[in-house]
Amino acid sequence: MIVMDNIRILLKERPVTEPELGHFMVETVEACIPKDGEILVSTIYLSVDPYMRGRMRDTDIFGKSYAPSLEIGDVIVGAVVGEVIESKDPHYKAGDIVETKLGWQTLAPISANLARKITPSLAPISTALGILGMPGLTAYHGLLDIGQARAGDCVVISAASGAVGAVAGQIAKLKGCRVLGIAGSEEKCDYIVNDLDFNAAINHRKDDIDSALTEHCQDGIDVYFDNVGGSILDTVMNHVRDGARIVICGMISEYNLTNPEVAVRPTRALLNHSARMEGFVVSDFAELMDESLAQMAKWVSSGQLKYREDIITGIENTPSAFIGLLRGDNFGKRIIQVRDNPFNDV
Amino acid sequence: MIVMDNIRILLKERPVTEPELGHFMVETVEACIPKDGEILVSTIYLSVDPYMRGRMRDTDIFGKSYAPSLEIGDVIVGAVVGEVIESKDPHYKAGDIVETKLGWQTLAPISANLARKITPSLAPISTALGILGMPGLTAYHGLLDIGQARAGDCVVISAASGAVGAVAGQIAKLKGCRVLGIAGSEEKCDYIVNDLDFNAAINHRKDDIDSALTEHCQDGIDVYFDNVGGSILDTVMNHVRDGARIVICGMISEYNLTNPEVAVRPTRALLNHSARMEGFVVSDFAELMDESLAQMAKWVSSGQLKYREDIITGIENTPSAFIGLLRGDNFGKRIIQVRDNPFNDV
């Protein structure tokens, strides 16, 4: 067995507010050898996602998260798409392409049970981290199962050009909804309206959200797919219609806070409008995933679902790419390309 | 036609914080004559309920309520049980007992469509305002349809000795749940545990709610049936379990506020626990009401559902009874007895 290097990024210090480069440490170590039931994976693409910020926290001021915290010195968690270099599991062989939870590292073994085989001929392999991966499925189940979006509904989506929001909005359009997106730049607003066919867009850095909602959702909002939380959520609650469904998918505006913000409780709006607010995580729908992924893949290959990737090269740039993601610097699904893509399919 | 008097209570001035006697006006007028399709109803019992506070508001600081506001000079809205004195509708005759939305007055016509016939032999007629009326049905549908309470669930109920809470708790027990009630006195706490068979009680005026929830709901809360809102809701949110359902039925602690309170948003708890928070009003379940009322009546007649009424005599005492209700002075369903009950069945 040849000794091979693994470049990995560890949590060096817990961020209190915004993460900084000094909170992370890059190191090169000898790659571990896979044990029985494991596969050795060489990362091609790795994913940076807002939820990772929650894993870097250990205090309980926000209550326990849906997943355990990282310890200092742990490799940052997350999904990657990689190539199987060596397999000690009968279901995999060298050369297979997998999506798995390897985290921010270039070469490491992982239990084969935690991997999912990717078919490179179906779609570019990077999509397994985006539209045909966790973010895409989050959009699908959040909109349809939690949000119960139906034809004719007025659907509002925050972080609407992001990895989840852009997909949720397009599925809503496919289902016959009227879709209004909230995004953080004119460029992003143009994109969701012109390229993704949203009915309208609000630039939350420039527009008055309250009056824009009054203008675009005159009969009120049926579904709010919320990726940002904070004051935008508070404002949207003043526009919910009877029977509205508020999908709590993320709250990126609150992830870097030291203490939870206070705001008017949403309960009166829920009571006055027989409305519902519900949180979820994509793994709640694990049993439906094969089916929903097949549907998504059809829409992608027919061109009914478009996607945009924001690819940054070099694992050493992962921390800065993640820090920027939390500020909304990305435009589309942010992915780190760690090595050459053998299919060259992006 | 004999001229008859109607004693009625009007909204004289809008309460800003707590309602006071001066906000109401009692007057005696000549009763109107029923038109075609109407019945003339003589009130026997009238209901005071917390939701009426919302009708006395006209400002939009809390957003639109699920029902329109009263105007100054309007008779206060609400349910009554009364006797039909004269009928201009083929479905009713003089002597019938009905539950209808006559409001705070002794004798007035109302559309027969807004009435429901009561069978005095089935249960005391006053129950049509409580356990076999709006509060009982609110408890039933709130707990089972919105809260989806299931055997083994840990269910927490606020205002647990009240007209809605006491019923919700008993139904939860019938369904095999573990039930913890929150109430405002030792006497009420004793009642829900000893008479209604709740598993435990918290006195919110004396006990530390957070530590009591930790003690009694060690694995977290599956269903919170909320009648009070405010800081108790905030505290409960720190104890929700994965998949929890928060039933927003009322928020009596907030009804007298001039401005909405601020608090930590419940969204992070919803997200971390894939939990749901949902508001409703009993009329959302109008189509199911016959069936659910039949089930409730069975439970009442078999003694599986107990109820307690807090009856005050004299229509002139309605405003003070209502003011006290908002303070939690009542013990059980508060009802005003306006005249003799011909069945003498309470």
Image: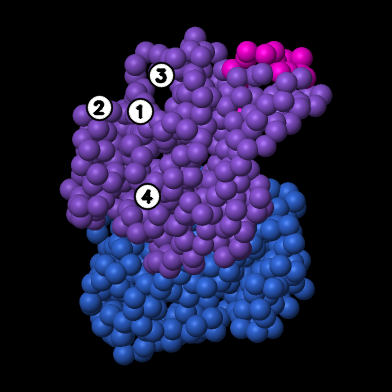
Chain colours: A blue, B purple
Question: Is disc 4 placed on a helix, strand or loop?
Answer: helix
Question: Is disc 1 placed on a helix, strand or loop?
Answer: loop
Q: Chain of mark 3?
A: B
As rendered, which of B139 and A75 lies closer to the eye?
Answer: B139
Query: Do the numbered discs 2 and 1 sit on residues whose CB atoms are within 8 Å?
Result: yes
Mark 2–mark 1 Cα distance, whole angstroms, equals: 10 Å
- Are dots 4 and 1 on a single chain? yes
Residue type (three-letter) at the residue carrying disc 2: Asp
Q: Nearer the viewer, mark 2 or mark 1?
A: 1
Residue type (three-letter) at the residue carrying disc 1: Arg
Residue type (three-letter) at the residue carrying disc 4: Arg
Which residue corresponds to mark 3? B346
Look at the image and give the residue range highlighted in magenta: B86-100
Q: Residue at x 69, y 73 (%)?
A: A211
Q: Nearer the viewer, mark 2 or mark 3?
A: 3
Earlier residue among tags 2 and 1 = 2
As rendered, which of B3 and B95 lies closer to the eye?
Answer: B3
Image quadrant where residue B160 sits:
top left
Earlier residue among tags 4 and 1 = 1
Which residue corresponds to mark 2? B195
Which residue corresponds to mark 1? B308
Q: Can residue A94 be seen by looking at this rendering?
A: no
Of helix, strand and loop, which mostly describes the magenta segment? loop
Which residue corresponds to mark 4? B327
User: Is A89 left or right of B207, judged from the image as shown?
Assistant: right
Question: Is disc 3 placed on a helix, strand or loop?
Answer: loop
A208 above or below A93? below
Residue type (three-letter) at the residue carrying disc 3: Val
User: Is B214 left or right of A7, judged from the image as shown?
Assistant: left
